[in-house]
Image: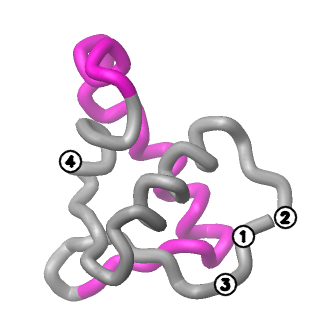
Amino acid sequence: MWLGEEEQIIVKYLQQLGGAGATAREICRKSATKDRWKENERWAMPFVQALRDKGLIEIDAGGHYKLTGKPVT
């Protein structure tokens, strides 16, 4: 499955967290640079949704996004 650069950044960030996951705000703040965050605080949201649509991440009842375990290529 092909992933764009932004999707790869988000997946790598979630991989570093292991099973803990992260909220949407944390993903937007911590997965890329501070400049990216300052330009647009919600920059990652379209890419998070695309990853959900592809079945690579899921959201739990607490609002944390986690990898599904599906192989990322």
Mark drawn on residue 72 = 1
> Which quarter of the rendered picture does the N terminus lie within?
bottom right
Q: CA distance from mark 1 to mark 2?
A: 7 Å
Residue shown at the point (33%, 67%) measured from the top left: 17
- Mark 1 secondary-structure assignment: loop
How much space separates mark 2 and mark 4, taking CA atoms? Answer: 26 Å
Left or right of residue 66, residue 28 in this image? left
Marks 3 and 1: CB-CB under 8 Å? Answer: yes
Q: Position of residue 33 (x, y in %)?
A: 36, 24
Q: Which residues are magenta?
A: 33-60
The C terminus appears in which quarter of the rendering? bottom right
Kind of residue at badge 1: Val
Look at the picture and state if 69 lies above or below 72. Answer: below
- Three-letter code, disc 2: Met
**Quick check: marks 1 and 2 in contact, CB under 8 Å?**
yes
Determine if the magenta segment contains residue 43: yes
Spatial CA distance of label 3 from label 2 is: 11 Å
Q: Secondary structure at mark 3?
A: loop
Q: Is residue 73 left or right of residue 33?
A: right
Give the Cα distance between marks 3 and 1: 6 Å
Does the magenta portion include 65?
A: no
Residue labelled with disc 2: 1
Mark nearer the N terminus (1 vs 4): 4
Residue 48: image location, x then y, percent: 47, 54
Horizontal side, residue 55 vs residue 44: left or right: right
